[in-house]
Image (cartoon, rainbow, N blue to C red):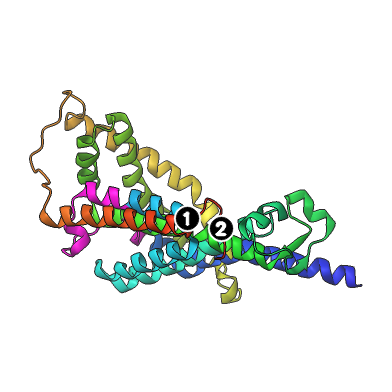
Amino acid sequence: MNYIIDAIISWLIFLFGVAAPFYLILGVIGIGGFREITKYEVYNSFYYKLNPAIKILFSVVVMIIASMVIWWISALLAIVILLSYTSLRNGRRKAFIGSMFLLSVIIGTTWSYAPLTPPAILSIAFPHQTTFLDLWKWPSYFAIMGYQPYLTLQGLIYGVQISFRFAAVTIAALILVMTTTPSQILKALHKLRIPDPIVFSLMVAMKSVPMVFESLDTSVKLQMLRGLGSDRSKYLKPIFMLIAGLSAIVPTIVHLMRGAKDIAISADTRGFRAYNRRTYFVDIPMTRTDYYMVGLFLAGIGVAGIMLALGFGRAIPYIS
């Protein structure tokens, strides 16, 4: 009897780690919410005035700092960037969506590492601890999925530490998408001597992501209006949204394939790659604020270097 109860609890714990991010993404954020944080909207606040190259550099600097320093500095960096979302158009709404997305990244990444990390790695991450606190013992057949025999407190902490490294970069990268047009990014990347095929691929991706979410959102809403899951509990809504989303994949792909033809015609009409060098009708200059930001980036990297010298940073995160 105890074996059956342990197995049920183990599967409930497993399902929580898998289902919680899906619930936050589908039940709280929704497809429409994802469209909001992956689409450019006209506005006139600080981020919108920065040169696109500076915003690209911002994401790179955040990635460098998050990969160098101790995990709680990455956590503070992610929180500060998230709070800056309030300066965007519909800032409070986007800050809320960003916080839910951040939470889903933390839970998903933590659960990707916590039960799978072997004690040998944990002993490196926690060099001052000789024993680990076991929270749960998995059934033996969970080893097929790569699970360690025990879920430990140190494993969970290690997963949270890793998650904030991903979270800070993800939150920073979304700022570029929300505050810059594809055309502006195209100009910035071209001036950085990035090859045109790579630039064009990135621009198509930026233009396609909002279209994907918009098509999925429309298809899902149509299925809901037709009564999908209407006679079931509201707590099961995320499950039916997932079912509707899977059913919407084919019409979304068809819509994207039709849109690809329009993108090709548009690029050809505008003479993309007709000449080796591009000309610009509207140039995007570097302003004083942009140079201040470059100075801030250099100072941030310098502080990160000092933190490394003081021992607040390793390739494998740890508790100091």
- Residue 241 visible somewhere in the drawing: no
Position above or below: 271 against 247: above
Considering only order in the chain, which callout, 1 or 2, is on the residue closer to the N terminus? 2
Residue type beneath disc 2: Thr
Query: Is 24 inside the magenta-drawn segment?
Result: no
Examine the image and state in which quarter residue 218 appears: bottom left
Residue drawn at x 17%, y 28% as measured from the top left: 271
| Residue behind mark 2 | 109
Q: What residue appears at the point 36 percent right and 54 percent down from the top-left corner?
A: 62
Q: Position of residue 38 (x, y in %)?
A: 34, 55
Q: Give the residue at x 19% y 63%.
A: 46
Residue 175 picture location, percent across and down: 31, 57
Q: Position of residue 66 (x, y in %)?
A: 43, 55
Say if 275 sits above or below 309 in the image. above
| Magenta-colored stretch includes residue 41 | yes
What is the CA distance from the residue labelled 2 to the residue labelled 1?
A: 8 Å
Q: Residue furthest left?
A: 281
- Kindly identify the amino acid type of the residue bearing the numbered disc 1: Phe
SS state under label 1: helix
Residue segment shown in magenta: 35-58
Percent across and percent down for residue 17 are: 63, 64
Instruction: Kindly state the secondary structure of the residue where label 2 is placed.
Output: helix
Please, which residue is most extreme toward the front here?
A: 310
Q: Are marks 2 and 1 in contact (CB under 8 Å)?
A: yes
Task: Find disc 1 in the rendering and name its residue.
Answer: 166
Identified at 66% across, 57% down, the residue is 122
Task: Quadrant for residue 264, please give it.
Answer: top left
Image quadrant holding the N terminus, namely bottom right
